[in-house]
Amino acid sequence: MKIIIAPSILSADSSRLSEEISAVEKAGAGWIHIDVMDGHFVPNITLGPAIISTLRKTTKLPFDVHLMIENPERYIESFSQAGADIITVHVEAANHLHRTVDIIKKAGKKAGVSLNPATSLTQIEEILPDIDLLLIMSVNPGFGGQQFIKTSLPKIVRAKKMLEALPYKVLLEVDGGVNLKNIGDIAQAGADVIVAGAAVFGSDDYQKTIAALKTAANSQTA
């Protein structure tokens, strides 16, 4: 399958998010990645369900909602009703991960689980049969524009092998520090979905940038 590019609106102009989403959709984005932060699990605070509900009217692209929050199970229903299509929670933040994933599934949404850079893949072995997406963080979550952690590449390779051993498709997503220089390596390591924030929204031409990211990624998987 072709690599999906999911621009992260964490790096977009927050005063004009609707326009930014429309712009990257026209530029060829596959998903819209939405980072939700609570100031507790990560040292930053971003948007909540009310804003996502408003943004939902802007596009029909899948909303890839990444919950970087404590006790995510309390908020699944709110984000589901707001228009999330994929809801991803952190293994480090969910006390009862299986229960939380089940809540996402029962809400009719795709369920994702994410790992911070220092968290071992062994932490998600038992939940793999229940999820639709595995998100590998290649920076420590909380802020956009960080540098890609190079040790993430072998972790992505190992994650891909784990997923390929399953009898069904689970997408592998990578988020953090992605740019034109490293996206080829990330794709080659096995990513299906690649989040790009500053690389897209920090550029002067979204269409040219997304096209270049796609070309660099898909050239490694052809």
Image (cartoon, grey):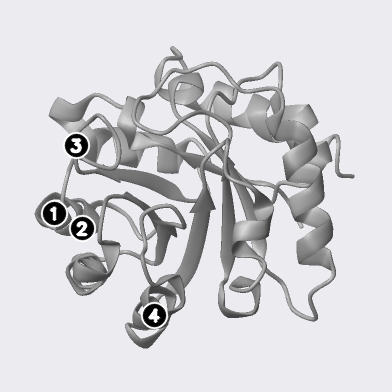
Q: Specify the amino acid type for callout 3.
A: Gly
In the image, taking residue 128 as reference, residue 20 lies left or right, namely left
Circle 3 sits on which residue?
39
Residue at the farthest bottom position: 106
Residue at x 48% of width, y 35% of height? 27
Gap in Å between the C-alphas at discs 3 and 1? 22 Å
- Residue nearest the observer in this picture, 211 or 83: 83
Q: Specify the amino acid type for callout 2.
A: Lys
Circle 2 sits on which residue?
57
Gap in Å between the C-alphas at discs 1 and 2? 6 Å
Q: Position of residue 75 (x, y in %)?
A: 20, 66
Upstream in sequence: badge 3 or badge 2? 3
The crowd level at tag 3 (other Cα within 10 Å; few <14, some 14-19, many 20+) is some
Task: Mark 1 vs mark 4: give the one in front.
Answer: 4
Q: Are marks 1 and 2 in contact (CB under 8 Å)?
A: yes
Q: Position of residue 79 (x, y in %)?
A: 23, 65
Q: Which quadrant: the N terminus? A: bottom right
Q: Position of residue 74 (x, y in %)?
A: 19, 69
Circle 4 sits on which residue?
99
The crowd level at tag 1 (other Cα within 10 Å; few <14, some 14-19, many 20+) is few
- Residue nearest the observer in this picture, 133 or 4: 133
Q: Quadrant of residue 39?
A: top left
Circle 1 sits on which residue?
54
Q: Secondary structure at mark 4?
A: helix
Q: Specify the amino acid type for callout 4.
A: Arg
Q: Does the rendering let one see residue 216?
A: no
